[in-house]
Image (cartoon, grey):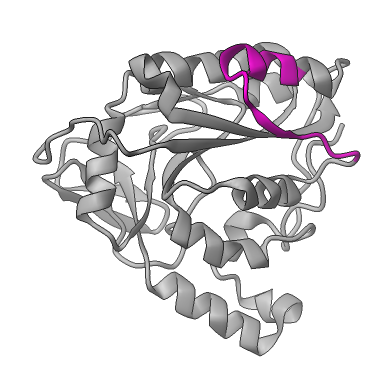
């Protein structure tokens, strides 16, 4: 990797997390961030968490207590109704640091990661909106496809940069709500478009029907914002371990499907 790491002494990072009621998974995920990213710099991180009331038969307060064991000053929200888009909107609206670690409660960090190097990439390449962490090419049996000049994600080939990341060939369809180091300026332009009934990822994919929700001026505003940015994937293979799918299968939950996104969150 070309860029040098080296902790930015003035850098404070908000971690924003969307969570549901699954205490063992939440704890494993938070613990993985503490052990594999925060390490000896835990005082440089703030945790912001939204806890939706759906999942196992435990209270939202039980999940909050887990978060507070690791981050005593956790900023939290415990809504009465679950909604992933609104959970994300609340979390992103609380963030205040220039760079923000976004995660969902079921993506465990599988490898030690050099946050200083990730920060240096974002500082060196100001057009990057996000530096995504990678989970491989196959949901059920993740495979490492890194090491070559490109990797395939969706319909596009992402090109390797010797400073340690793969960059998307264009803006459309390259953004994701999977764990990432995000730039606050990018998030602020997306927040107004997050609402219940619209999948956040479909917003950033710029689905054709968005004009029905936001009108032509809003759609053009979103297009202008997205075209300003690029997305990258951090060149560390299989950095994430997905705990969500086994949990959903074991507890009988599924994601509601629809051509216009997520109305709420998990359903049985």
| Image quarter hosting the N terminus | top left
Q: Is residue 251 left or right of residue 139?
A: right
Q: Is residue 226 above or below residue 20?
A: below
Foreground pick, 50 / 215: 50
Whether the magenta-drawn stretch holds residue 236 is answered as no
The magenta stretch spans which residues? 63-80
Where is residue 138 drawn, in percent x and y? 44, 33
The residue nearer to you, when weighing 1 against 74, is: 74
Q: Residue furthest front?
A: 10
Q: Position of residue 25 (x, y in %)?
A: 64, 16
The verdict on residue 67 being magenta is yes
Q: Is residue 172 above or below residue 142?
A: below
Q: Position of residue 47 (x, y in %)?
A: 57, 30
Image spot of residue 167 (x, y percent): 27, 54
Residue 25 seen: no
Q: Which residue appears at 31% of the width and 38% of the height?
A: 10
Q: Nearer the viewer, residue 33 or 154?
A: 33
**Is 213 or 9 nearer to us in this picture?**
9
**In which quadrant of the rendered view does residue 145 lie?**
top left
Q: Is residue 233 above or below residue 227?
A: above
Residue at image point 73% right, 21% down: 64
Q: Is residue 14 shown to the viewer in this render? A: yes
Tell me which residue sits at (17%, 35%) in the image: 147
């Amino acid at each position: 990797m070309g860029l040098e790491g080296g902790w930015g002494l003035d850098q404070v990072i908000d971690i924003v997390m969307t969570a549901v009621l699954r205490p063992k998974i939440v704890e494993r995920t938070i613990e993985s961030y503490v052990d594999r990213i925060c390490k000896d710099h835990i005082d440089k991180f703030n945790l912001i968490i939204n806890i939706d009331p759906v999942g196992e038969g435990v209270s939202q307060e039980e999940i909050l207590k887990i978060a507070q064991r690791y981050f005593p000053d956790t900023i939290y929200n415990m809504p009465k109704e679950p909604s992933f888009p609104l959970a994300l909107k609340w979390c992103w609206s609380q963030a205040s640091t220039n760079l923000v670690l976004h995660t969902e409660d079921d993506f465990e960090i599988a490898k030690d990661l050099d946050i200083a190097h990730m920060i240096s990439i974002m500082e060196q390449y100001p057009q990057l909106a996000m530096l995504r962490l990678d989970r491989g090419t196959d949901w059920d049996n993740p495979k490492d496809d890194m090491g070559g000049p490109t990797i395939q994600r969706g319909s596009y080939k992402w090109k390797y940069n010797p400073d340690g990341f793969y960059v998307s060939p264009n803006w459309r369809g390259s953004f994701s709500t999977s764990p990432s180091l995000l730039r606050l300026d990018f998030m602020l332009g997306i927040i107004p478009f997050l609402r219940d009934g619209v999948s956040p990822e479909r917003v950033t994919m710029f689905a054709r029907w968005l004009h029905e929700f936001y009108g032509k001026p809003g759609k053009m505003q979103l297009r202008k914002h997205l075209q300003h940015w690029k997305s990258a994937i951090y060149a560390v293979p299989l950095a994430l371990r997905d705990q969500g799918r086994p949990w959903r299968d074991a507890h009988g939950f599924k994601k509601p499907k629809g051509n216009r996104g997520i109305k709420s969150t998990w359903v049985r």
